[in-house]
Image (tube, helix red, strand yellow):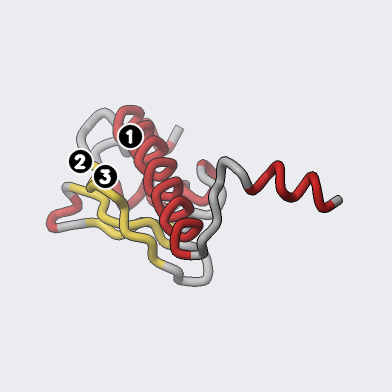
Amino acid sequence: MEILGQAKNPTVIQLHLKKLFAGIHKVAFGANNAEIKAMISSVGEQVPLSQPIQVGDEVELWLGDLEKVMRITLDGILQETLKKSGLDINNTPSQICQLA
């Protein structure tokens, strides 16, 4: 109820993010809390989002956008890490099964 009641105050909503998204303890806001630029874990690890999330009055919309961009960001980081490691995500699972 507090999320809906405080929809125009994103810093209050931030208190509930750890309950909504596993791994997100809080977020880094841009100027005037108008956008979200990064997600921050409970141990302080900061992951910049691939694109900023515009924070508006309709909290359900920007929370949905946060979820989408969080997934896109993490997918991009995973793909980049696999590429730098020389792993091919399309072939790796079958190679693991063959070793077992």
- Mark 1 vs mark 2: which is more N-terminal? 2
Q: Callout 1: 10 Å neighbours few (<14), some, many (20+)?
A: some
Residue 26, picture quadrant:
bottom left
Residue that carries the numbered disc 1 in the rendered image:
65
- The residue depicted at 44 percent of the width and 64 percent of the height is 84
Residue that carries the numbered disc 2 in the rendered image:
54
- Mark 1 vs mark 3: which is more N-terminal? 3
Which residue lies most toward the right here? 100
Identity, as a three-letter code, of the amino acid under mark 2? Gln
- The residue depicted at 45 percent of the width and 57 percent of the height is 83
Residue that carries the numbered disc 3 in the rendered image:
9
At numbered mark 3, what does the secondary structure look like: helix, strand or loop? loop
Where in the figure is residue 37, as x and y percent of width and height? 26, 55
| Distance (Cα) linking label 1 and label 3 | 17 Å
Up/down of 85 relative to 19, above or below = below
* Left or right side of 81 for 22: right
Residue 70, picture quadrant:
top left
| Distance (Cα) linking label 2 and label 3 | 13 Å
Where in the figure is residue 27, as x and y percent of width and height? 36, 56
* Left or right side of 47 for 50: left
Identity, as a three-letter code, of the amino acid under mark 3? Asn
Up/down of 15 relative to 60, above or below = below
- Mark 2 vs mark 3: which is more N-terminal? 3
| Distance (Cα) linking label 1 and label 2 | 8 Å
Q: Work out whether residue 2 or residue 15 is closer to the camera in this orientation and state it.
A: 15
